[in-house]
Image (spheres, helix red, strand yellow):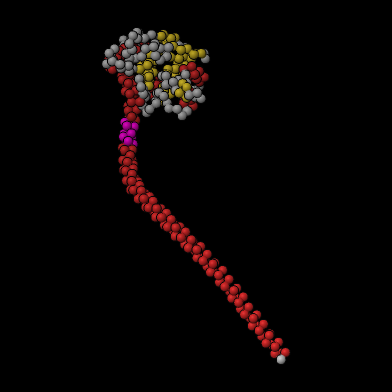
């Protein structure tokens, strides 16, 4: 009986414990369920927030892409328009290039024709000056340095034998190139006519006759502004009397004797019209000595710009150069004149025609 009570009591206790355990598990599950439900609600709220933000981001991105696409489309249209404009400009440039090339070809052809004509004129000019063979027969140790600024020159020399006397002129015509060459041809022609008209050769009178002929030929008068003409150094050499007559229109004569320079200056008048300066040309009578060195020249040599200070060579330096080289053989003198001129000029443009004539007596 006692044991039965104990067993019955134990069963009651077990049942109560089991009920308690079940209730506790139920409560635990209820708490977990509530927690899970709360988390689910939180996740749902968060997901909804994310979805709303995501929709906004997508909408913003879509709007941005749409705007960017619109801008890109406008830029593409501008680029297309610019491309068309560039193509039009390219076509215009190609047309201008073709026209420029054609014009350049025409200019080249025209320049070639002009150059050919000037070269031919140079041959004509060379034909009217005394030939080298004659000049070397007339003058001992002859030095001729003739360097035109262009193909043809306004500077020239001319010589002729009249009654056993030698007439020699070195002249610088107004201008250079074609105008100077025309003036030189006129000067040579008028010199020949003037010499033939002279009954007695006098250098000063010969220059006066030449001046009158040039004024008449160019129709110069005080009412016109034409001052074309030439500067001339003129010699009449009489070997029988050993006398040189010299007369100069601006240009001078240099004689080197015993290593000293003797300069005879020309009058400050040109061969041509000069208002209030129509006096007689001075006639210098010079008794020359054997081995005298004679130099006649135009101003182109010592007017050349160059050197370190880019200035004129100057006449005093030119005279020193003549003194330093006068005892050299003629060919060496020509080389010295050329080398000094080119070294001084360097890269500068030649400013004028250059002519130097020298010989020994």
Q: Is residue 196 above or below residue 103?
A: above
In the picture, which quadrant includes the C terminus? Answer: top left
Q: Quadrant of the N terminus?
A: bottom right
| Depth order, front residue of 265/40 | 40
Number of on-image labels:
0
Residues rendered magenta in the picture: 107-117
Q: Is residue 195 something one can see in this rendering?
A: no
Q: Residue at x 44, y 58 (%)?
A: 56
Residue 194: x %, y % from top left: 31, 14
Asked if one can make out residue 249 in the rendered structure from this viewpoint, the answer is yes
Q: Position of residue 175 (x, y in %)?
A: 35, 22
Based on the displayed image, in which of its 4 quarters is residue 150 positioned? top left
Residue sitting at x 47%, y 62%: 51
The furthest residue to the bottom: 1
Which quadrant would residue 288 be assigned to in this image? top left
Judge whether 305 appears above or below 83 on screen: above
Q: Residue at x 43, y 27 (%)?
A: 349
Residue 33 part of the magenta segment: no
Camera-side residue of 72 and 109: 72
**On screen, 249 above or below 99?**
above
- Where residue 252 sits in the image (x, y, percent)? 42, 14
Give the main secondary structure of the magenta stretch: helix
On the picture, is 88 further left or further right than 304? Answer: left
- Measuring 37% from the left and 12% from the top, which residue is drawn there? 269
| Residue found at the far right of this picture | 2
> Where in the figure is residue 303, as x and y percent of width and height?
44, 20
């Amino acid at each position: 009986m006692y044991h039965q009570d104990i067993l019955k009591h134990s069963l009651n206790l077990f049942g109560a414990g089991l009920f308690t355990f079940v209730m506790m598990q139920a409560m635990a599950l209820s708490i977990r369920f509530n927690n899970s439900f709360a988390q689910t609600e939180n996740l749902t709220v968060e997901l909804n927030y994310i979805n709303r933000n995501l929709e906004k981001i997508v909408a913003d991105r879509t709007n941005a892409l749409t705007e960017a696409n619109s801008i890109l489309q406008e830029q593409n249209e501008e680029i297309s328009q610019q491309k068309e404009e560039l193509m039009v400009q390219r076509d215009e440039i190609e047309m201008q290039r073709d026209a420029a090339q054609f014009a350049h070809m025409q200019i080249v052809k025209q320049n070639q024709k002009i150059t050919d004509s000037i070269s031919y004129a140079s041959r004509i000019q060379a034909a009217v000056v005394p030939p080298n063979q004659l000049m070397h027969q007339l003058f001992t140790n002859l030095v001729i340095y003739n360097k035109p600024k262009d193909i043809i020159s306004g500077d020239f020399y001319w010589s002729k034998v009249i009654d056993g006397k030698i007439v020699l002129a070195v002249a610088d015509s107004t201008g250079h190139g074609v105008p100077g060459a025309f003036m030189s041809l006129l000067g040579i022609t008028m010199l020949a006519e003037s010499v033939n008209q002279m009954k007695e050769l006098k250098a000063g009178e010969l220059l006066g006759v030449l001046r009158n002929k040039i004024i008449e030929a160019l129709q110069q008068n005080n009412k016109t502004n034409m001052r074309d003409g030439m500067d001339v150094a003129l010699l009449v050499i009489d070997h029988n009397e050993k006398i040189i007559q010299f007369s100069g229109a601006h240009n001078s004569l240099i004689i080197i004797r015993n290593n000293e320079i003797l300069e005879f200056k020309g009058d400050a008048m040109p061969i041509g019209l000069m208002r209030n300066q129509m006096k007689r040309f001075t006639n210098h009578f010079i008794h020359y000595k054997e081995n005298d060195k004679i130099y006649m020249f135009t101003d182109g040599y010592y007017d050349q710009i160059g050197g370190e200070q880019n200035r004129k060579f100057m006449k005093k330096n030119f005279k020193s150069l003549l003194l330093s080289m006068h005892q050299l053989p003629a060919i060496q003198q020509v080389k010295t004149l050329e080398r000094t001129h080119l070294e001084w000029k360097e890269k500068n443009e030649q400013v004028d025609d250059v002519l130097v004539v020298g010989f020994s007596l």
